[in-house]
Amino acid sequence: MFEHFKRVSIQKRSHIGYQRFKHYQIYQVMLPYSNFVLSAVSIYLLFLVFDYQHLEDDFSTAVFIRTTLSALCFAMMLWFKRHKPKLLNFAEFSLILVVYWSILYIGQLAIDVGDFNYQLGGTLVLVYVGALSRLPFHYSFCALTAMLIIYLVMIAPERIAHDFDGEVDRISIMVGLFFIATISSLRRDFETWKAYEQYRQIRSQRLRLQASQKSLAEQTITDPLTGLKNRLYFSQHAFDAERYACRHGLTYAALMIDIDNFKQINDLYGHQVGDKVISQVGDVIQSYCGNLTDMNIRYGGEEFLVVFLRIDKDTLEQIAADILRSVVELPWRDTGLDVTVSIGAAFANAKQTPLKKLVNLADMALYRAKNEGKNCLRY
Ligand SMILES: Nc1nc2c(ncn2[C@@H]2O[C@H](COP(=O)(O)OP(=O)(O)OP(=O)(O)O)[C@@H](O)[C@H]2O)c(=O)[nH]1
């Protein structure tokens, strides 16, 4: 128990933690259970039947008070639920007090006609606060205290004058009820905190799981060496890209880029240097194509594929020329390592040529570039 108190007070001190708890209390506790308030209001309205028995001439006043207040409670709770759920605690707290006051007021009317036992309905409101309401403890405690005071001011003096012993009994029962309802509210608060703790843990586990699923999914479509998308990504998105290009009647284009004499680089300088070359060529391609496409793929070992859905021939040629030049200018020159790439390009109308065929055309053009001296662009 002490541990629980300590934990609650530590969490309450942390402002953000407390704000989150408040949010939980409103949206996960108060909101779903707010219809209970309406059932309590219905019971309050049903007491009209007894008003008729007890009040004789003042019956119409009671009818007016009960119907007006019930309508107000219904309307207010529904309105707050819909428009201002954050104020639901305050709304229920106010309604409890107004309803309690009205019961005692009707009780006073009964006293005026000589009936001293018609305010006991007020104790049902105390029971409601302890047993049914989902108000946080500080609201419940304030409401219970206020109700006790209202009773002591409005009803107790007249009843003491009428029946001292009976009223002392009644007040002691009310005080007992006050303590029981207070303790119930406190226990409810602890349970809410506990439920919130569990909810928070489950939620953070779920978020962690979602994040790791997302990063795993990202990893499966990303090439770890270059950070570009891999062939799996291409096969997953090729159909959508093709359909989009067809629907919009686009002429799409593909560049197939392959590092020249790469086996030799591996053999002469080792695989680590080979990896660095692949990674740097990937950076060059990304720097020229990244803004124009998200189909920037490491297609094979030292082979890259770029698909453009909207591009004109001049821009494509400019990009290819920039890539050829930038790869040659890579800082490897100082080490005596010559890095160049060959590029095959293809253009096609999406309605007539499937994307797979476009890629084949680019591949064939790459083959020509390799055969015609490498370090060049061919169609
Ligand atoms: N370091 C490294 N080498 C790789 C990787 N993937 C493939 N390779 C190597 O790349 C080389 C490709 O060689 P080839 O297909 O003969 O092509 P090439 O030597 O570039 O010849 P051309 O394409 O005709 O210019 C092979 O030796 C593969 O082992 C990789 O991720 N890292």
Image (spheres, grey):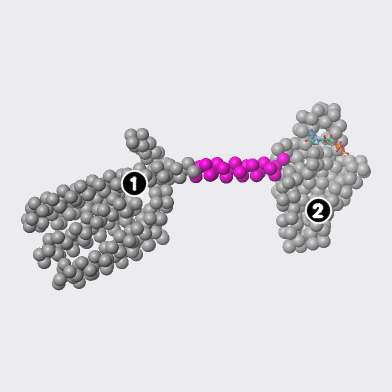
Residue 16 at x, y percent in the picture:
42, 42
Q: Quadrant of the N terminus?
A: top left
Say which residue appears at 26% left-offset and 63% top-offset: 44
Considering the numbered disc 2 on the image, is that residue within a helix, a strand or a loop?
helix
Q: How many labels does the image show?
A: 2
Q: Mark 2 points at which residue?
A: 356
Please rate how many residues cluster around mark 1, counting C-alpha atoms within 10 Å: few if below 14, some from 14 to 19, many from 20: some
Vertical placement of residue 235 versus 51, above or below = above
Predominant secondary structure, magenta span: helix
- For marks 2 and 1, give the CA distance: 64 Å
Please rate how many residues cluster around mark 2, counting C-alpha atoms within 10 Å: few if below 14, some from 14 to 19, many from 20: few
Q: Quadrant of ligand 1?
A: top right
Say which residue appears at 72% left-offset and 40% top-offset: 223
Q: Residue furthest right?
A: 372
Among the 4 quarters of the image, the one containing residue 252 = bottom right
User: Quick check: is the Cβ at mark 2 less than 8 Å away from ligand 1?
Assistant: no
Say which residue appears at 11% left-offset and 66% top-offset: 113
Q: Mark 1 points at which residue?
A: 188
Q: Is residue 230 magenta?
A: no
Considering the numbered disc 1 on the image, is that residue within a helix, a strand or a loop?
helix
- For discs 2 and 1, the disc positioned in front in the rendered view: 1
Dots 2 and 1: beta carbons under 8 Å?
A: no
Q: Which of 3 and 240 is in front in this view?
A: 3
Say which label, 2 or 1, has the lower sequence index.
1
320 to the left or right of 177 = right
Residue 298 at x, y percent in the picture:
76, 42
Q: Which of 273 and 152 is in front in this view?
A: 152
Among the 4 quarters of the image, the one containing residue 75 = bottom left
78 to the left or right of 297 = left
Residue 359 at x, y percent in the picture:
82, 51
Q: Does the magenta stretch include residue 210?
A: yes
The stretch of residues the image draws in magenta is 203-223
